[in-house]
Image: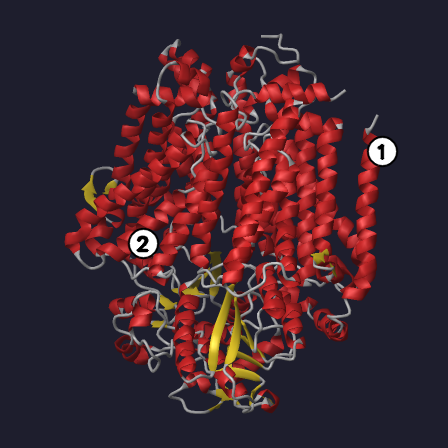
Amino acid sequence: MRKTPLLRGAAVTAAALLVLAACSTDDSVDDPAPDAGSDPTTSESTAEEPPADTEWFVQADYDEQDAQRSATFEGDPATPWLQYIDGAMTDTSKYATQESQKVCFANASISNPWRQTGFITMNQQLQALQDSKVISDMEVRDAQDDDNTQIADIDYFIAEGNCDVFIISPNSTAAMTPAVERACETGKPVIVFDRGVNTDCYTTFIHPIGGYAWGIDTANFLSENLEEGDKVIALRILPGVDVLETRWAAADKIFAENGIEAVDYFTGADPTKIKQIISDELVKGDVAGIWMDAGDGAVAAIEAFEDAGVDYPVMTGEDEMSFLRKWEETGLTGLAPVYSNFQWRTPLLAVEMIAAGEPIPAEWVLPQTPITEDERADYLAANEGMPDGHYAKFGGEDLPGFPEAWQDR
Amino acid sequence: MRTRLESLTSTGIVVIVLALSLVIGAILTAVEGRNFLSTGNISAILTGCSILGFIAIGQTLVILVGSLDLSVPFVVSLTSVVAAGQMNGDPAQVAPAVLLALAIAAAIGLVNGLVVSFLKVHGFIATLGMGLIISGYLATNYQGSHGSAPRSFRLIGATQVGPVPVSALIMLGCALLAIVILRRTRLGHHLYAVGGNPEVARLSGIRTSVPVVAAHVLCSLLAAMAGLLLLARLSVGSPTIGSQGDYDLMSIAAVVLGGTLLAGGKGNIVGTLAGVAIFAVLDNVMGVMQVNPFLKDVIRGLVIVAAVAVYARREIDQRPARFDRPTGLSAVLQEKP
Amino acid sequence: MSTQLAAHQRGFAGRVLAAVLTPGGAVYVLAAALLIATIQANPNFGDPGVIMLFLGRTAPIAIAAIGQYYVIVSGEFDLSMGAVIGTQVVLAGNLIGEDPDRIVPVTLLMLLVGAAVGFANGVLTTLLRVPSFIVTLGMMLALGGLVSYVTGGAATGNPVDEFREVGRGRFENVPVVEFLPYPLLILIVLAIAAVWLMRRPFGRNLLAVGDNPESAERSGSSLWWLKTRAFMLSSLAASVSGILLVGYAGVHPSVGDGYEFTAITAVVLGGVLLGGGRGWVLSAAVGAIALELLFTLLTVQEVESTWRDTVQGVIIIVAVAVAARGWQAGRRPRRSDTRTPSTRIPTPISTNQPSQGTNTGDN
């Protein structure tokens, strides 16, 4: 008997709450008003995207990155983390200050060796800049690989952080765009690095050339060293992550053009899975090449060939020490593509430049050069004593705490 | 009557734990030189509650009926990309997109429920398998963020009433509906009965499949609500957003933290909400204190076990053995007329 | 239980027939079918050496499944398995390093750590009455986080090759099968030990407690110690699995990821009832082999990488649904309590309840 009225009551209450909420919406939305301004651009850019969605391949980006591979970089090659491709500069004179800066860093995660290495480098760089009083403090929030958490982190910084500068390493590109725009609206400098965002409201966006360049370097190398019709196993970490999808998209295209048969697998970077997949493929038939979208777990792939007692493949890994060491030990034909780990220093150095009011590149494209067999010995020597999960091009040799900070993790 | 008293006390414990964590959180936040009760912080905590809240409410229903749902993260991701694709920035498509997302989720829940109740597959395996099935579909069809939400829809994620985000209010509305269903409808009573002891429930003339299927459908629908809310917050659909949040295990943890028996048959929504809030406060405080992300997991793990241990001790003190659930059940059944 | 009791009363042929009809027996048929399908798709997989290599690399997951079996059959879950494997892998990498003299002490330490984790799981579950799902979930988070924190998320590197030999090496020149991988040998030893253990009072009590916790309590066996031993066996199995995986694949933080779910899936594929009380330990191990065969078959059939999860999901559900039918067929009347084993109250108990307030006839 009582059920129906109660149910109805609940529904009415819920509806009333909603209406109430809807009413107050218009008032409170006033603070993020500029959001309305930026809205059309967002929808426009997404409207252009659908073809990319289906193919996950943007020819213009591919061509641009292809060209950037051979571009000339401004600055001293001895400090590649400060090099950039000539282009539009952001005028930062309005930010010039003598005060120590409070930096707020919204990090996507430190859940893989690449990010762990970079984060150490960043902290050592921070120490150097704290010693020179450029930075007073860096508050870090780690989103543990979750977009939703990172949005909350950025909003928290805006509301509670007393930040002078925002540094954001987005967990994913499109999803983080609105939150980065909100950070921009505070009028403080916003530095984005690694993965990008679909807006250019930032002060600077720091990144190596990109995923297509990785795919082009690696797939060209394999195509040159293999015959038409050879089989390549592509080991991919996981689907749905844009920075990894572009690497594969470029490589897949080049393999197809060169008549290389490429079969891709998702491994989660788990060496057990990698070894099983390669073992099964070796039973099925010859495998001439291995392509990886990140070098994590490369050693297991090589070991699968050893266990099966067949010749080593032509292979592309990454500049992770484990791969470089195994590569040297086995003498296989290989290439270590680099997703420049030293980029983790650059955002803090950008803070220094911004505080000094110096112009900085609006899109700061860092060099991204693979390590070839000829250079391998130098990098192995330079990184001796580093753990297997360390990255050769970490670029922290001149920072305080070298090398212990990277050795004792 | 006894059921009410018991649930009051058990929920009471959870609420006390929550109050305790609020106090400790306020102190620790103050030590860091921050204000725990500032608008920004309260809004951050409530936002943290809302997504997991939706999923945990649904998970409560499924656990009450004696099953589990491990497919929720994938339902979240699927609804987020499907709705985003349907909207594609067009405000006119919001309603169709929402309906489409909910319909797909309901269908998934229906399949889960049918597999569990008619094929006799344990909920753990049925929903694990369903999660894998959806995950394959997502991986094949979505290689990154997809579609976009128009501004009108994004407002749901961005709007606040004072410090309270609208998303949290919608979540509380859903919680209220779930409470009404559990307390005042035949379905709710059957849910407890089947979860308490399916055999007895069957013998007493309940069609045990109905509450099982209904709970699974509701759970998937609530996961879809979470997916839609995430779409509003992210502005684009994401094929990995559900897995990113570990919503399967964390929602189960929140439900048990809230005092619901994992074996089914006993528990309530208010406790679950308190459990979700405990997690949100914990995360918030750890964020303010800049706890190392790896240590965060350690603390989460310890808190989950410790909190449930406090609660479980109390259970043993109160009850002679773990088998008086049917008593609770019969009390529920008696409450029906 | 009823199936097993019934089976004991028949002759050998009858027992085999009855066994194959149960889910615990059906998994052998499933494994054989998958193997035949794989060989048919690519005859190379019929080569004895290839089969041996396959069994060798499947040993860690089969051992994990045996460990998980003890816990599941007693009516609990162990979700901490993957974290235990990850811990052992990192311990091996960081503590043994390049020093062969440390192999023995560190291995002992690893087993000790495994036993300690299992002991903690067991005590928290039984004495503090925290559901094992939650205890082991908490353990998974805590252990995984602790290891990452202590190591900064990255292990130093692979341990010496001598240590890895146990997971990578093999006996050469074995008749018929060409060679015998060490992991397979360890699996065989552990499987025999498991069969023996399940025939001992410990095993019988474990089954009894999973089937009906109260009766086991009444029969006087110490419930907490019984279940705690099951958890310890599970963690020890995970530790052995971890040792083999270090050998097989090397050190990486992601080794062991998701092993808890793989092991549970394997156990359930093996016809073991989630919720406890029913199932054979060898079937759990064969469940693991069937699961790995399925992955291999997907590779052989060149199933699109993105669709593999879906195929796996469908097959798991179908296999378990068929198995559920099997248990029902094996029992006399249709009883619906097999559906939700997490409700662990078997029918006889409910009749013991003094007043149900509902109809308790029909027994």
Q: In which image quadrant can residue A298 be found?
A: bottom left
Label 2 CA crowd tier, 10 Å (few <14, some 14–19, many 20+): many
Please tell me whether mark 2 sits on a helix, a strand or a loop: helix
Q: Quadrant of the C terminus of chain C?
A: top right
Give the side of residue B131 with respect to residue C85, left or right.
right
Tag in front: 1 or 2: 1
Q: Which mark is residue A5?
A: 1
Residue B237's place in the image compared with C300, above or below, is below
The residue that appears at 74% across and 34% down in the rendered structure is B181
The residue that appears at 84% across and 32% down in the rendered structure is A4
Residue B83's place in the image compared with C111, above or below, is below
Amino acid on which the number 1 mark rests in the picture? Pro
Q: Which residue is mark 2?
A: C90
Subunit that carries the residue with mark 1: A
Amino acid on which the number 2 mark rests in the picture? Val
The Cα–Cα distance between marks 1 and 2, rounded to whole angstroms, is 60 Å
Location of residue A188 in the rendering, given as x and y in whole percent from the top left corner: 61, 79
Location of residue A326 in the rendering, given as x and y in whole percent from the top left corner: 29, 66
